[in-house]
Image (tube, helix red, strand yellow):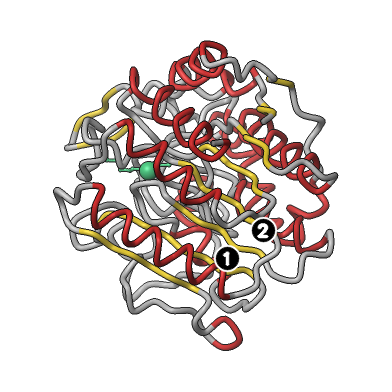
Amino acid sequence: MRTFFSEDHRLHFPQAELTGGQFVTPYERPSRVEYVLNRLKEQGLADIVAPDAPDMAPVKKLLDPGFLRFLETAWDEWKAAGMKGEVIAAGMPARGMHPDRCPEYIDGKVGYYCHASETAITGGTWRAALSSLASAQSAQAQVAAGAQAAFALCRPPGHHATADQYGGYCFINNAAVVAQMFRDDGAGKVAVLDIDFHHGNGTQNIFYDRADVLFASLHGDPRHAYPYYLGYADERGTGAGEGANLNYPMLPGTPYGPWAEALDDAIAKIRAAGVEALVVSLGVDAFKDDPISFFKLESADFADAGRRIAGLGLPTVFCMEGGYAIEAVGINTVNVLEGFLG
Ligand code: Q9C
Ligand code: ZN
């Protein structure tokens, strides 16, 4: 399996993440991918190539062009307004306010296009996000051309980004773009299987009213875990998309047994839906030692999960999402891929 990866991820390295009322070094840091690259090489999966340039045409169709322009220009506007630090949203439109009137002043625009203030934008964020997107798109192109599977080592991650909001360390929803590209290439139905610990609110939101992209997510119960305000089991899709959204929220302390049962249920429903291509949002923060998560998966469980996913027999693009137990991120990620390969 080929890995697509761009060194340009390094352009995104914010100094600040707001957590517990403090600014800390972000959990989502450049060194995460070093562990994945090293493990790939250690395990003989050293077919690692740089992606082609990103293709913005499918992105502009799926995501809000105003949001994309905002991501591209936010840092410059922020600096031009005299702001001293990194771009951080202080306020967002909440209950009782206008959720869809975009202010003109940059501080207001940031809140309009953001849903969680832990995530900072810096001068290199846009180019890094584009390089992450490029890896996902090149992986999709390789699979569309006949490869059984490809791995996009995306950084920054994408699954929390909606069509018009960033947050949760995510800016552009790589997995959603890949799913749309499979559709544009002729797949009648596509599934996105999200095994990151956190609910893939962005992907759910983008495809919520669509029957042609099935979304299934295994995640920490939103009553206890970010993104908190989405990810309940009764969110099943709307209109034509009714029934095409599958959420499996699970409680703190959940071990592999019940997690794997949820995975099997999602896999069975994907199989029954007649899906022709699969996108896996591959986060490994369900790991027992993850510093910001609460499931109890062991490293070996990730290989077992990969085996189960392979049982679908579908052309598959893996997009890297989260995973913050830094020294285990490589082992756990590559275990999924090795389990998949058999
Ligand atoms: N300070 C992904 O895994 N909440 N994003 C952080 C700890 C945000 C996770 C709480 C977590 C975002 C791609
Ligand atoms: Zn996550």
Disc 1 packing (10 Å; few <14; some 14–19; many ≥20): many
- Report x, y in % for residue 251: 18, 57
The tally of labels here is 2
Q: Three-letter amino acid code at disc 1?
A: Ile
Give the vertical position of 36 relative to 57 (above or below).
above
Left-right relation of 152 to 187: left
| Nearest the eye: 186 or 17 | 186
Q: Which mark is residue 63?
A: 2
Give the vertical position of 304 relative to 259 (above or below).
above
Mark 1 beta carbon near ligand 1 (under 8 Å): no
How far is disc 1 from disc 2 in space, using C-alphas? 8 Å
- Report x, y in % for residue 52: 81, 30
Q: Secondary structure at mark 2?
A: loop
- Report x, y in % for residue 71: 61, 42
Q: Quadrant of the N terminus?
A: top right
- Front label number (1 vs 2): 1
The residue positioned 65% from the left and 73% from the top of the image is: 274
Disc 2 packing (10 Å; few <14; some 14–19; many ≥20): many
The residue positioned 53% from the left and 37% from the top of the image is: 320
Q: Secondary structure at mark 1?
A: helix
Q: Three-letter amino acid code at disc 2?
A: Leu
Q: Earlier in the sequence, mark 1 or mark 2?
A: 2
Left-right relation of 5 to 25: right
Q: Which mark is residue 80?
A: none
| CB within 8 Å, label 1 to label 2 | yes
The residue positioned 24% from the left and 57% from the top of the image is: 258
Write down the residue under mark 1.
Answer: 206
The residue positioned 44% from the left and 30% from the top of the image is: 335
Residue sitting at the far bottom = 239
| Nearest the eye: 9 or 165 | 9
- Report x, y in % for residue 234: 34, 79
Ligand number 2: quarter of image: top left
